[in-house]
Image: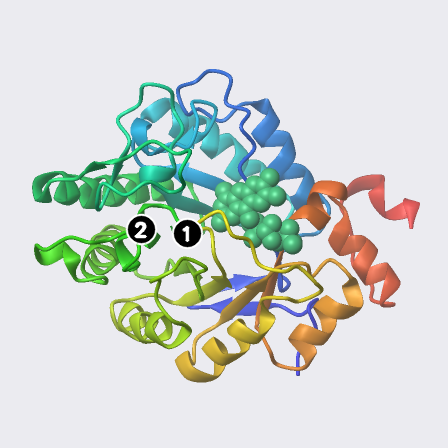
Amino acid sequence: MPSMFDQIQIGKLTVPNRVALSPMCQYQAENKRGIPENWHFVHLVSRAIGGTGLIFTEMTNVEPRGRITEQCLGIYNDEQVTKFREIVNEVHRYGSKIGLQLAHAGRKSVIKDGDIVGPSAIPFSEESPVPRELTVEEIRGIVKQFADGAKRAVDAGFDTIELHGAHGYLLHQFMSPASNKRSDEYGDYTKFPLEVIRAVKKVIPEDMPLILRVSAVEFSDGGYTFEQMLDYCRKFKDAGIDAFDVSTGGDCPTRPEVYPAYQTSYAEVYKKELNVPVISVGKLEDPNVAEAVIRNGQADMICIGKGMLRNPYWVKEAATELGVDLELPGVYNVAY
Ligand SMILES: Cc1cc2nc3c(=O)[nH]c(=O)nc-3n(C[C@H](O)[C@H](O)[C@H](O)COP(=O)(O)O)c2cc1C
């Protein structure tokens, strides 16, 4: 079995090692127009310098009302593309690959006086605003916005796109019987995500892999089951998903119990059943745990979130702890 320091192929993309920076909202777009700032440049590029094979941007939204807050990023105008291109070019200088996480917050947007929308007029929690139910025409418009966002990501030079189908955001909201009570055609839980996948696939290069992050289980009453979601994912794979990034929850305020590798058993089943690369995430920052997940064949890649907020050189330090040579650029290497 490979080590987390071995390269991996996702579709036709070769990633230099099996560690990814997990997508993490920074809430730092002070311009309030969804444009990446120097903050994002530093956050993403420093993890590339630290040896991370694949860098994911934070959830980056396809329209202004699709942002969680006004400080969140977007990919719906040319200024955003220009700044993303700078980040992508710099990440590539250090040999890492970079993916944009493409998203829409739907009912989880908290923009004050925003047009908060969702599949049905059901709030996320008792404290959340009641979303406005999207019309069929609006849903089709959002499918097109996903495709336009993907085109812009390609234009900015990204190596891959991850659709954010997890954590209770719009794609997930449509997949869940707890948040989608529609009686029209979009009451079919896979229709909207399948349309998004197909529309995105159509505009990205044939050799660019498309990844989907999903919540393998939900914590809402009346949510989908693990088996149902796995079944949806079979359809998503047939529609062109090249790899799955397996998380949980976010559909309601209930959170899972957190312990090392707490979500990896879900990834393991996905890997067996779907036969495409699978990424596991969730408290994998102990290098021995991370290496065991890859070596035991439970997942093909791992995402590190909070561990990399603490330490941009997580990969280098993990390599040192496990006795593996990993070259960092410039003089950083002499520190080890
Ligand atoms: C500050 C913060 C922001 C996050 N933003 C996102 C996001 O934009 N997209 C996403 O899919 N997950 C997001 N997450 C979840 C992480 O990607 C990851 O799945 C989670 O933190 C568990 O991994 P960890 O235990 O390594 O931190 C966020 C987590 C944190 C802590």
Which residue corresponds to the image point at 40% horizontal and 29% vertical from the top-left? 110
To which quarter of the image does residue 262 belong? bottom right
Helix, strand or loop status at disc 2? helix
Q: Disc 1, disc 2: CB below 8 Å? A: yes
How crowded pointer 1 is (Cα within 10 Å; few <14, some 14-19, many 20+) is rated as many
Q: Which of 193 and 5 is in front in this view?
A: 193
Q: Which of marks 1 and 2 is nearer the N terminus?
A: 2
Q: In this view, does 206 lie to the left or right of 184?
A: right
Callout 2 amino acid: Gln
Residue sitting nearer the eye, 177 or 46: 177
Disc number placed over residue 79 in the picture, else none: none
The residue type indicated by label 1 comes to Asp
Q: Is mark 1 on a helix, strand or loop?
A: loop
> For the residue carrying disc 2, how many other residues have a C-alpha within 10 Å: few (<14), some (14-19), or many (20+)?
many
Is 247 situated left or right of 200 in this image? right
The color scheme shown is rainbow
Q: Residue furthest right?
A: 335
Cα–Cα gap, marks 1 and 2 = 8 Å
Within 8 Å: ligand 1 and the Cβ of disc 1? Answer: no
Residue 251: numbered disc: 1
User: Residue 12: in sight, yes or no?
Assistant: no
The image shows residue 93 at horizontal and vertical percentages of 61, 42
**Residue at disc 2, CB closer than 8 Å to ligand 1:** no
Q: Is residue 88 visible?
A: yes
Q: In which quarter of the image is residue 128?
A: top left
Mark sitting on residue 173: 2
- Extreme residue toward the top, this view: 31
What percent of the width, then of the height, locates residue 144? 18, 42
Asked whether 304 or 181 is in front, the reply is: 181
Task: Tell me if residue 82 comes above or below residue 233 in the rendering.
Answer: above
* Place of residue 334 in the rendered image (x, y in percent of width and height, measured from the top left): 91, 46
Q: Position of residue 333 (x, y in %)?
A: 85, 48
